[in-house]
């Protein structure tokens, strides 16, 4: 591999996008300096300290899927891949609390590998199950033309005569949590991506990867990995502008009253912050960022006096609570007589006008219907966190306003989950964008080396059925 040791790269933003760019470039011998305004790395995928115990808890349980090839690569490279537990079974609970384990069969080729388990979902009528199967096939075969107006997935499902019950009990369950957007707002193409990449292209693509230490614990190791390769990580370093220099090809980063010069810069900020630092000639990027809307995610952190379930997670069908996660890591500081669960509600706009205690009570009712032990359990304490700008909203036409990682300045790149990756707001999208920015920097320096990892291969039958991306 060619190396360009002399080249310096400044990275603005220490979320997963910035970290991925830093890892890819530091590994290839570039001098990397990363500036993060907060006192910790990780951005929106972050941890906080439980004031009661001092334990680190994640703001929201983050999970990856088997189809997240670049995120997996990032974890492998930095040595944090051993801090994830792979789940090849998803535990669904129907509206009446009946449990269904969603898993693949080995005896059927992809994409039929999930059909037997799907056909057992008795909270859908047989007619609905058949209808969902046919509609899934149609969705996977739908091709998009950038010029035509795209409907929302909700509009499309109704036009394809999906019953309200099938929409509530199947489509919403998988899509709202994957896209963090309601079906009325989410685009058809984003929904298609979830099913094609997440369920229909490869046998393991739906597997769930859940960190078994806190997110902060992962970043501590990534930071150590970077520093061992000569990268410098500045925390609490808020960048106020990035500008092209008149006297050279370099760019300057203004941070804490000083100006630093770099051969290349990656701006890895969220869409709402990018306009704060980019120079006026980058207005088009800032303007496209202003067209992007946010979608909220709410997490309820609940401590009980007893165990509710021995399952690591549960997907609740047709309930306010969408996903329940049992503690994935046990911190030494955590008292043995407390049992911690997280309940996730994505696209939680409707909660804004509701009383928090009222939301908590509905969640507790959901848990009681799902786990008998919850009926006798005492809630010791609880916390509700809503990230109003958790993710960008994957509205129809959204892909048209996403900027590419390359800007018109050859040595200035963008990264961030919201940039053009084809992915919804995910850790995979963030890492992919960072890798794409790194690849573009290497390319601009005449170093041709692939950084982005390919998707999982499409199964022969999926390809034959026209379900390829
Ligand atoms: C509640 C919630 C739940 C989620 N669940 C999942 C999930 O289960 N699975 C999944 O794949 N994804 C999930 N996501 C999405 C995922 O967290 C994001 O897509 C990803 O973390 C975005 O990374 P990023 O680097 O693009 O942006 P960010 O994480 O926003 O990083 C940008 C960084 O830039 C820093 N910054 C801002 N301004 C400046 C400045 N002026 N100078 C220096 N630094 C600055 C910020 O502090 C931040 O650290 C979830 C997100 C949220 C909020």
Image: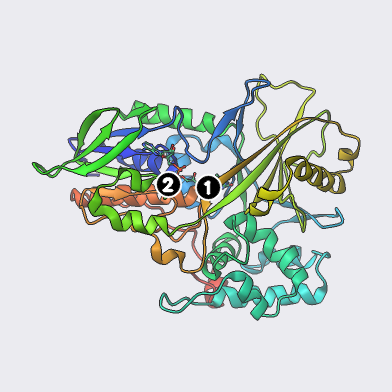
Question: Which of the marked residues, 1 or 2, is nearer the chain's N terminus?
Answer: 2
In-front residue for pair 319/311: 319
Q: Nearer the viewer, residue 267 or 61?
A: 267
Residue 389, image x, y percentages = 53, 47
Q: Crowdedness of circle 2 by 10 Å Cα count: few (<14), some, many (20+)?
A: many
Q: CB at mark 2 closer than 8 A to ligand 1?
A: yes
Where disc 1 sits, the SS reads: strand
Is residue 111 found left or right of 12 in the rendered image? right
Q: Count of labels shown?
A: 2
Mark 1 in CB contact with mark 2 (< 8 angstroms): yes
Please provide percent x and percent y for residue 137: 62, 75
Q: Which residue is mark 1?
A: 389
Residue at x-position 67% and y-position 65%: 113
Disc number at residue 270? 2
| Image spot of residue 183 (x, y percent) | 63, 65
In the picture, measured across the screen, residue 306 lies left or right of residue 314, that is right
The numbered dot on residue 27 is none
What is the spatial separation of the Cα atoms under label 1 and label 2, in whole angstroms? 10 Å
- Residue sitting farthest toward the right: 376
The residue closer to the viewer here, 70 or 305, is 305
Label 1 CB sits under 8 Å from any ligand 1 atom = yes
Other residues around mark 1 within 10 Å, as few (<14) / some (14–19) / many (≥20): some
State which quarter of the image contains the N terminus. Answer: top left
> Would you place residue 88 above or below residue 198 in this image?
above
């Amino acid at each position: 591999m060619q190396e360009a040791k002399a080249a310096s790269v400044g990275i603005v933003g220490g979320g997963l996008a910035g970290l991925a760019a830093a890892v890819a470039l530091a590994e290839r011998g570039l001098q990397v300096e990363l500036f993060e305004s907060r006192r910790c790395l990780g951005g929106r995928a972050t941890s906080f300290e439980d004031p009661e115990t001092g334990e680190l808890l994640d703001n929201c349980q983050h999970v990856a899927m088997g189809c997240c090839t670049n995120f997996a690569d990032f974890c492998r490279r930095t040595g944090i891949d051993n801090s994830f537990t792979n789940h090849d079974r998803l535990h669904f609970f129907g509206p009446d609390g009946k449990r269904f384990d969603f898993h693949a069969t080995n005896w059927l080729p992809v994409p039929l590998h999930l059909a037997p388990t799907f056909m057992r979902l008795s909270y859908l009528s047989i007619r609905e199950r058949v209808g969902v199967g046919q509609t899934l096939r149609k969705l996977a075969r739908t091709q998009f033309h950038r010029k035509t107006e795209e409907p929302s997935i909700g509009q499309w499902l109704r036009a394809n005569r999906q019953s309200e019950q099938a929409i509530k009990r199947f489509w919403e369950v998988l899509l709202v949590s994957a896209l963090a957007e309601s079906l009325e707002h989410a685009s058809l193409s984003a929904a298609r991506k979830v099913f094609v990449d997440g369920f229909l292209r490869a046998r393991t693509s739906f597997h769930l990867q859940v960190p078994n230490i806190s997110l902060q614990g992962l970043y501590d190791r990534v930071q150590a990995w970077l520093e061992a390769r000569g990268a410098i990580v500045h925390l609490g370093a808020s960048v106020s502008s990035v500008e092209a220099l008149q006297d050279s090809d370099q760019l300057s980063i203004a941070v804490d009253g000083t100006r630093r010069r770099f051969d290349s810069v990656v701006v890895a900020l969220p869409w709402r912050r990018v306009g704060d630092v980019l120079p006026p000639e980058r207005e088009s990027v800032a303007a496209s960022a202003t067209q992007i809307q946010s979608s909220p995610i709410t997490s309820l952190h609940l401590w009980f006096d007893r165990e509710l379930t021995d399952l690591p997670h549960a997907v609740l069908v047709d309930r306010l609570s969408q996903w329940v996660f049992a503690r994935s890591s046990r911190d030494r500081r955590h008292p043995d007589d407390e049992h911690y669960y997280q309940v996730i509600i994505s696209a939680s706009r409707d909660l804004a006008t509701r009383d928090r205690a009222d939301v908590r009570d509905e969640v507790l009712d959901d848990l009681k219907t799902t786990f008998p032990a919850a009926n006798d359990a005492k809630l010791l304490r609880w916390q509700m966190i809503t990230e109003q700008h958790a993710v960008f909203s994957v509205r129809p036409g959204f892909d048209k306003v996403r900027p590419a990682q390359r800007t018109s300045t050859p040595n200035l790149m963008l990264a961030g989950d919201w940039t053009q990756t084809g992915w919804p707001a995910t850790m995979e999208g963030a890492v992919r964008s960072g890798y794409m920015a790194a690849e573009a920097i290497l390319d601009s320096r005449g170093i041709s080396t692939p950084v982005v990892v390919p998707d999982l291969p499409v199964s022969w039958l999926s390809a034959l059925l026209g379900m390829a991306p």
